Image (cartoon, rainbow, N blue to C red):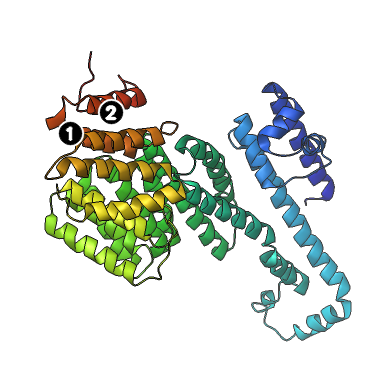
Amino acid sequence: MVDSDEIRTARRALGRRLAQLRRASGHTQYEFAQLVQYGRSSVANTETGHQHPDRTFWSRCDTVLRSGGALVAEYDRITELDRRLRRVSAIQEGRAASGPVASVASSSRAGLDADDDDVLWEYEDSVDARRLALKSSTDDDARLAYVESEVRQAIADNERLTPAALMARMRPLRVYVDQLMAGRQHPPQRARLYNVAAHLSGLLGALALDLGVFGLAHAYAAEAFDLAEAAQQPEVQAWTRATQSLIAFYTGDYHDALAYAQDSLQRSGTGEHRIRLTINGQARALARLGDRYGVDRAVDRAFTMLSDRPASSEVSASLALGPYCQARTAANAATAYLALGRTAGVTSHLAIAITAFDTAELAGPRALSRLDLATAHLHASDPDPEQAAVLAEEALALTADQRFESVHQRTRQFLATAQPFAHHPALRHVADMLVDRTQVGTAARPALPSLP
């Protein structure tokens, strides 16, 4: 039978193993503590067997030391031994504390058949111990609340921080979520964990798209949807489908973009995502597929839904977990109409969008709206290539320190529309700016060649 000495010996051995692996990897205790995000004293005390950290610590150690989960596996084995010992102790204490009751119970069992005697196989203390375990979820709630808060903040920070900076901030959080998913939680907590993991993977997919890493973007988005399906939450499924639609749109897979948007609308029911799904997903994809009637219907539905909501001047996040705002709805409507070569109403839509985005200081949307307005100037009955070039230059200047694949693509589309004015020096300057931005030789050249 397991005893407490065996467990203490196993814990000391695990600590020594950690020390061996740490030294073999060339880390001091101080350096290693920083990598696993614990204090140096915690590392030192764990290595000597004087401290017994939780599973998260050992999982981080495995990750840093690349030990293939060996430390977590041993921690789990020791934890199971400790659980068995505590259970046996609880049963034994229950027997000692219920002497008279036990004798009564024994005498009351005298009349039972032999086959029925096994029914009364547990004591009250063991049942109470299990009840306490069910209630010991405070730590899990705290961890989940932390992750949920971090993901909500990151979605709000998207377009405010550079995609590279936000990606660097979120990747360690994704590792932490993986560690939580390897543990055990009660069903409601498990559902929360899958939901936040889906939102996190969807955000990482959008960031990978902004950085132009399309394969990774698709992989993250597919993972996000799989997590949402496992959680069986239609609203989260709808949100992840919208992210898949966004990525498909910017990778030129317009039929897929439309299919994902329509599936998302079916899953969302009457949810708050419907404005985004309709205007950002359906309308823009339909425009790229040349469906004028479909675009008109989608835009009308989006603005009708928007009118049913309380008016607000606040700009929603691009990956909004709630409804889209007026500025984003107007901006997406303008993008859809311009893809069809239509300019009616576009300028008024863009005036609303640019004012809101400038006030919110969102670099990406500010640039995209200016590029659309520049394109509108080229489509006008009296084209103004000079003003169009000024707006395009402003757009690229606004995102000079950030990489947005959407801005680069929109600039290429603008330059393609500007082909009839290829002789204009200001437009050639825009082409040169884009070449410098996308590092010639690693990205597609713009439609207007630079002067030699």
Q: Residue at x 26, y 55 (%)?
A: 348
Quadrant where the C terminus lies?
Answer: top left
Q: How many circles with numbers are drawn on the protein?
A: 2
Q: Residues within 10 Å of mark 1 (few under 14, many from 20)?
A: many
The residue indicated by pointer 1 is 418
For marks 2 and 1, the one nearer the N-term is 1
- Please name the residue that numbered disc 2 is placed on: 430
Where on the picture, by quarter, is residue 300?
bottom left
Picture coordinates of residue 18 (x, y %)? 72, 32
Q: Nearer the viewer, residue 122 or 70?
A: 70
Q: Amino acid at mark 2?
A: Val
Kindly tell me whether residue 409 is visible in this rendering.
no
Residue 214 % position (x, y)? 34, 36
Return the x and y of residue 207 as percentages of the image width and height.
Answer: 42, 41
Nearest to the observer: residue 262 or residue 106: 262
Q: Is residue 256 visible?
A: yes
- Which residue: 51% across, 36% down? 165
Residue pictured at 60% horizontal, 51% vertical: 183
Between 445 and 170, the one nearer to me in the picture:
445
In the figure, 47 relative to 229: above or below? above
| Residue situated in front as seen by the camera: 316 or 179 | 316
Could you tell me how far apart the alpha carbons at marks 2 and 1 are, in whole angstroms?
11 Å
| Amino acid tagged 1 | Ala
- Which residue does the image show at 31% across and 45% down from the upper left? 369
Mark 2 in CB contact with mark 1 (< 8 angstroms): yes
Relative to 182, is 127 on the left or the right? right
- In terms of secondary structure, where does tag 2 sit? helix
The answer to whether residue 55 is above or below residue 269 is above
Q: Secondary structure at mark 1?
A: loop
Residue 429: name its quadrant.
Answer: top left
